[in-house]
Amino acid sequence: MDNAMKSVYDSVLARDPDQPEFHQAVEEVLDSLDPVIEANPEYIDVVRAMVEPERVIQFRVPWYDDDGNLHVNRGFRVQFNSAIGPYKGGLRFHPSVNLSILKFLGFEQVFKNSLTGLPMGGGKGGSDFDPKGKSDSEVKRFCQSFMMELWRHIGADLDVPAGDIGVGGREIGYLFGMYRKLANEFTGVLTGKGRSYGGSRIRPEATGYGLVYFAREMLSTKDKSFDGATVAISGSGNVAQFACEKVIELGGKPVTMSDSSGYIYDPTGIDREKLDWIMDLKNNRRGRMKEYAEHFDGVDYTESKPEPNLNQMWSTKVDVALPCATQNELNGDEAKMLVDGGVTAVAEGANMPCTPDAVDCFLLNGVMFAPGKASNAGGVATSGLEMSQNSIRMSWSREEVDQKLEGIMVNVHKTAHETAERYGMPGNYVAGANIAGFLKVAESTMAQGIL
Ligand code: NDP
Ligand code: 2IT
């Protein structure tokens, strides 16, 4: 980082010293931007403005559980940047949610959305509510209470939330229903909606499919492919499930999946039938991965242990690793285990799952590495396609949406790859994605005046 950039970073640290995830996300981007500022010194002012969200909304979310007890959660929406389009990004319901996490996610979303080539700004929101173990009616009451405040801050041309950890089709349905009632209008204010009320085909699959399309493109630059490749996947939620599905379709062999309680290792591979079983377990029965090892023969289950214990899942010998659970789930020592096991490529399905040490380890050891803001952009890109369909009051076929998604991911890969080359860092997708994502937003910000 050069001096001007360092002073921006120092001001971020000084202003919000208690936001480590946000610092991490900002540092990674600023580290990439030196050559851009060298070529366009005026962009340093854009950087100064970009590290501060345009608006942050925080609110109270009171709700009653099934026994009539009151709970009070905290709700947020971080409207980070609208230079190239309405704020766009998911909602996360998880007990760990705080402003640091939502600001890191919102900040990354700005670059990711820009990379998709679609006109979407960046935002993120959510709550420290834990959907785990809650009844359907408790989740519904929570979502309704959450939207009772959020609705006045969002809109189809203003801010369009979607899902993220803990927010899937069920939650989006309850949120959309409440928005429609309060605003007295039916618009595409949320994405990830059900098919029967304006949702896009392929949106549930999009992040996982997009991730594998991106990884396929990355592998092909070194004449490699998923065909016959052994793959480690972490997580077992939306992104992990559909990444697994696409890996199987391309001839790969996924051998691990996990949840916050532990991971399974299935040496014979997770096939279509076993994946269907996992989808039913996770999406309908809301069960734990441990049950997979109890149900299928020859499967190892390892319970997760808190840090400083290493997650042994990453010591599995694989060709490709797809971390699809959460931020900072894969550290430098775990990256070293993957390298020792001979990994060729790592592509982030989650947002920032690899720590800076892990990323350094991959790059130093010549492992192809795709940062989430490029490789998981297929989810928000397909949300963008849902917004388009809602605007023109049409719905496209599965093939049409999948084709567009694939085209966008091929293009995101090409953009990140070519930009890295142009700026003298061939093969560095982190630099390529950060620079390309930044340039479009910076140009728009300058053209409109920094406001
Ligand atoms: P889900 O809620 O569907 O699944 C999350 C998965 O990650 C679960 O298996 C969960 O296990 C695990 N997990 C979550 N938090 C932790 C934790 N603290 N420690 C260990 N495991 C954890 O979420 P998604 O699949 O939608 O999201 C996964 C990642 O992908 C997130 O980083 C998200 O931001 C990112 N992402 C999602 C997109 C989308 O369209 N949904 C788009 C782009 C990125 P458990 O059930 O035990 O909590
Ligand atoms: O992190 C992400 O890109 C998402 N959770 C998806 C956001 C969206 O608006 O579809």
Image: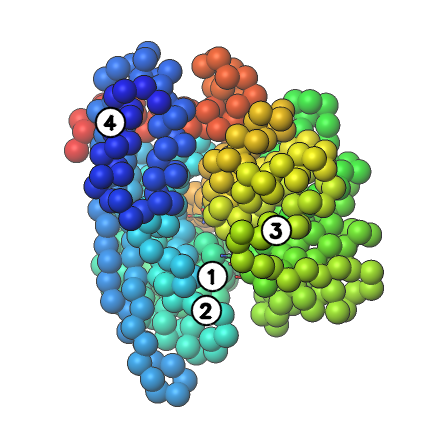
Q: Which residue is mark 1?
A: 166
Residue 296 image-quadrant placement: bottom right
Q: Which residue is mark 2?
A: 131
- In this orientation, which residue lies closer to the viewer: 278 or 23? 23
Q: Which residue is mark 4?
A: 7
| Badge 2 or badge 4: first in the primary sequence | 4
Q: Amino acid at mark 2?
A: Pro
Front label number (2 vs 4): 4
Q: Is mark 1 within 8 Å of ligand 1?
A: yes
Q: Amino acid at mark 3?
A: Asn
Q: Is residue 125 left or right of residue 361?
A: left
Q: Amino acid at mark 1?
A: Gly
Q: How far is the residue under mark 4 from the one under mark 3?
A: 36 Å
| Badge 4 or badge 3: first in the primary sequence | 4
Disc 3: CA contacts within 10 A as few (<14), some (14-19) or many (>=20): many
Q: Residue at x 35, y 61 (%)?
A: 127
In this view, 45 is above or below 129: above
Front label number (2 vs 3): 3
| Badge 2 or badge 3: first in the primary sequence | 2
Q: Number of labelled discs?
A: 4
**Which quadrant is the N terminus positioned in?**
top left
| Badge 3 or badge 1: first in the primary sequence | 1
Q: Amino acid at mark 4?
A: Ser
Q: Secondary structure at mark 2?
A: loop
Front label number (1 vs 4): 4
Q: Which residue is mark 3?
A: 311
Give x and y (percent) for residue 272.
Answer: 75, 55
Q: How far is the residue under mark 2 from the one under mark 3?
A: 25 Å
- In this orientation, which residue lies closer to the viewer: 42 or 352? 352
Q: Is residue 56 left or right of residue 24?
A: left
In this view, 151 is above or below 215: below
Q: Secondary structure at mark 3?
A: loop
